[in-house]
Amino acid sequence: MLAQVTVLNEVDGECVAVERPNGASPVLIICEHASRQLPARFDHLGLTEEALNSHIAWDPGALAVARGLSEALDATLVYQRFSRLVYDCNRPPEAAGAMPERSEVYDIPGNAGLSDEEKKARTDALYVPFHAAIRALIRDRKAVGQDTVIVTVHSFTPVYHGKTRAVEIGILHDDDSRLADGMLAVANAAPQYKVERNEPYGPADGVTHTLILHGVANGLRNVMIEVRNDLIADQAGQGVVTGYLTRLLQQSLDA
Ligand SMILES: [Zn+2]
């Protein structure tokens, strides 16, 4: 008989965190890669401390920017409390990247050759409740007449596979580009950062999963924001970028 696979235990707590649950803004901020924390059971997944601190484990600075936006806009924030290395909540269960065996230059020993039971246990523990919580929030808001605009917040590494990335902020979208178009128009009217559409990656790379699931499928305006992580490595940078993104969002929502 198979031993039951346990992903989260009592010390780990819930995987979903919600802040400002009664935010008045239509914006619902989602941060899938907020945390590098591993559930107690995982014992570093065989990775070095350096790898566990790097962008493969989380999006450095993204949660701080997401919280800043949440405060500035009075917007509800939902984030995943555990590392994307255990389950990447911006990927469907069938995607290889959901529980990657390799990320950029790192092999992930603790993800090598996972059994179907292990994959299902991680999916049920981390992916299912995360997206169910977002679905419930959208439904509850709709019930009281509150609109929802989906905004996901991410960061990316300035150097990937040895190549330096010039783009500073990416405004990403899938089929519904309404909000992205508006933000890009505001950005282009007064250039402050190097802002690009669907960079440093786009829908073909599978990064718009959350947007499709909660935005496109529900006819809700949506956007994915990617910030180069060297710009938000400290509080000062996080504050400047948060102020900038608040302006882009507010002006395009008002337009
Ligand atoms: Zn991310």
Image (tube, helix red, strand yellow):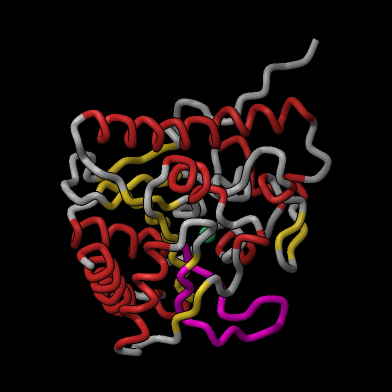
Say if 115 sits above or below 157 in the image.
above
User: Which residue occupies the foreground of this view, 114 or 225?
Assistant: 225
Q: Does the magenta-highlighted stretch encompass residue 210?
A: no
User: Which residue occupies the foreground of this view, 146 or 58?
Assistant: 146
Q: Quadrant of residue 14?
A: top left
Residue range in magenta is 154-171
Q: Quadrant of residue 236?
A: bottom left
Say if 223 sits above or below 43 in the image.
below
Residue 250 rendering spot, x and y as whole percentages: 22, 66
Quadrant containing the N terminus in the rendered view: top right
Say if 45 sits above or below 233 in the image.
above
Tally of marks: 0
Q: Does the magenta-highlighted stretch encompass residue 166?
A: yes
Q: Which residue is pictured at 78% across the width and 37% down the height?
A: 114
Residue 39 rendering spot, x and y as whole percentages: 54, 39
Quadrant containing the C terminus in the rendered view: bottom left
Q: Which residue is pictured at 47% across the width and 52% down the height?
A: 35
Residue furthest out toward the right: 113
Q: Which residue is pictured at 31% across the width and 41% down the height?
A: 18
Residue 108 rendering spot, x and y as whole percentages: 74, 53
